[in-house]
Amino acid sequence: MRTRIARVVITTLLGLGAVTARADNARILSFESPADWSVSDGTKSGSSDASQGAAALAVTGFGYTRLTSVPLTTVIGAGNTLLLDVKAPSTPAWGTIQLFVNIPSRGVYSAPSSTVLLTSLPAGRYATLSFTLPDSVVAALQQSYTDLTFIVAVSTPQSSQTWLFDGLRFQSTSASSLIQVRVTDVDDFLYVTVDGVRRKVWSLGDPDLGQLIDASAWFGQGSNTVRIQAVNTGGPARYGLEIWVDGQLVATDSAPSALATSAPVGIVVDRTLTVSTPNRPPLQTVRLTSAAPGALYVNKVYTGLTTPATLSLPQGGYTFGLGVSQDLPFNYTGSYYEQAVTVTGSTSTVDLTAGSPLPVQKTTSIAIVPIQVTYNYVTSLGGPDASNAGVLQQSDIAPLLSEVEATRTVWLKPLTYGLADWSVRVLPTVTSTPLYETSPDGLDLDRFLGESGLGYLRQQYDRIVFYFSQQRADGTDVQDPIGTVFAVGRQYIGFQASYARLVGANQPNPYFLHETLHNNEAYESDILHEYNGVAGLHGANQHGYYTEGTSGETDFLRFYRVYIRGQLAELDGFRPDVNWPSVPATADLYVGVFDTWPVFTGK
């Protein structure tokens, strides 16, 4: 269920007197409404192409114009430097821009700032311009008044094109604000995303629960959108959230009390808070390009965007990733590019394909253990019996190895963008120790490792594949055969010979891929403490992937592909008992096992 969106405005762009005045001043100086500014020449309008906030002021068709604000009240934090974001349609051959300050009640009339030349403006993108005010004007701005107006005077060659203006603000001379976040009592997951960037996931038992953590780098100057998503995997759902700015509690949130006794599985809370932090470095524009379009990741999390893309981000360090792929059945390719970038106080452009793609980040070691004899459960006896034994043939071993190698080459490496690989070894067939089925469809794998003397494999390999047969020596099925292959936790896979025969030598095996993904899924939840989505790897229908040959891809491979890449789109209406009618075009949350590939170990 989606809860009602809550908005909490904590402060504003320049931090002003009365509450209503603060809201007006922030709107005016952020150019959120064209009604707040008049123009002496040209045509004004609002534009959603903003450098910050939701809108900018667009002015079309002028050579010289003066933009004049409606009156503002006292500003806090006034200093000698004013900043203004300007987007020119093209770099002018000549031109200037200058600010003027009027405070008649303080004897200030059209006091000029320094003049900025326009000949170095970049074409078609925002630039932040800096203006210096005289000390006498700053002294007046630091007093009380209700009649402050700003004038922006622009002189440039006459043109019918559109200029954009946004974010008039004082450059902060004080220390940047400290923003802290505390999360308490989470059950099961709480995702916090700020201005479109996922920042942290808290989970049940997280050591950070109850701690004030420094979240300053998540926030930029002005209004910040904080998205809070609570995810439940069963039982009750709850969380508590606090946001502190410079030691003051400015926002709180918690799960509805009804969820504490009964909550569905999936996204159960999706709320947005607006938190304004004027004493942070301003957001900066980052343009991300590539030689070929690709899937964009920020800090290892898929954004839902494809390059080229433009982001507005708080200053600080980021890891930008790009997955470039060809997703044609049996001809898949995939490469992943990554750059660590420090976003500073100016607009930047990053070509994510400027370097080489990342090499394999983790080679997972796999031991295939052929087991000659399996004693299967007999219901009438209440346990395993040697008379109901499956016998693995030596001729079953080579086909499985060829299928695993084909799965590795054709699917694993390209679908992980080349980040993951397998190193596969087939051990000698175990002939002296049987594998016991001690309950219907339940094999005692630990007992087998102990009795066969192969317990050391748990430390030596990331995955252990127990390869067995459910056919007798004469080829007939055993009584009540196990009808499936399976994975147990992060390390074990039980794989029977009939599932290798279904595919054939040298062909990729979707059943083997499926079980290995269960191991990654366990790593995602057990070690990385993140959510695998409604029904996890078995959630194809719940996410709109119905047919086993969607888009011509083998079995559920289209679903596996997005799950492997962390691109599985989840909406807050998804539930285990609801089959979604189609694959959604957008997501409330992207899930999958992408972040396991560089680090996976079953040990």
Image: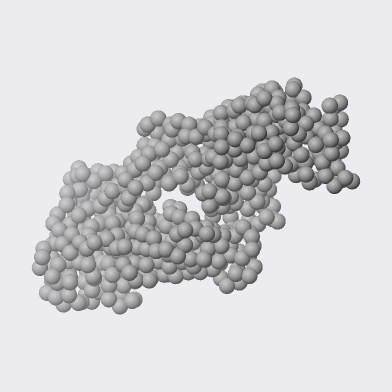
Nearest the viewer among 96 and 351 is 351
Residue 408 place in picture, x, y as percent:
59, 29
- The one nearer the camera, 252 or 494, is 494
Res 402 visible: yes
Q: Position of residue 269 (x, y in %)?
A: 55, 63
Q: Quadrant of residue 436?
A: top right
Quarter of the image where the C terminus is located:
top right
**Residue 549 seen from this side:** no
Q: Is residue 191 above or below residue 380?
A: below
Q: Which residue is found at the position 31% from the left and 72% from the top?
A: 22
Residue drawn at the location 52% of the way across and 59% of the way down: 205
567 relative position to 84: left or right = right
Image location (x, y in percent) of residue 259: 60, 68
| Quadrant in the rendering for residue 225 | bottom left
Residue in the foreground of this view, choosing between 287 and 250 = 250
User: How does the figure colour the protein chain or chains?
Assistant: one colour
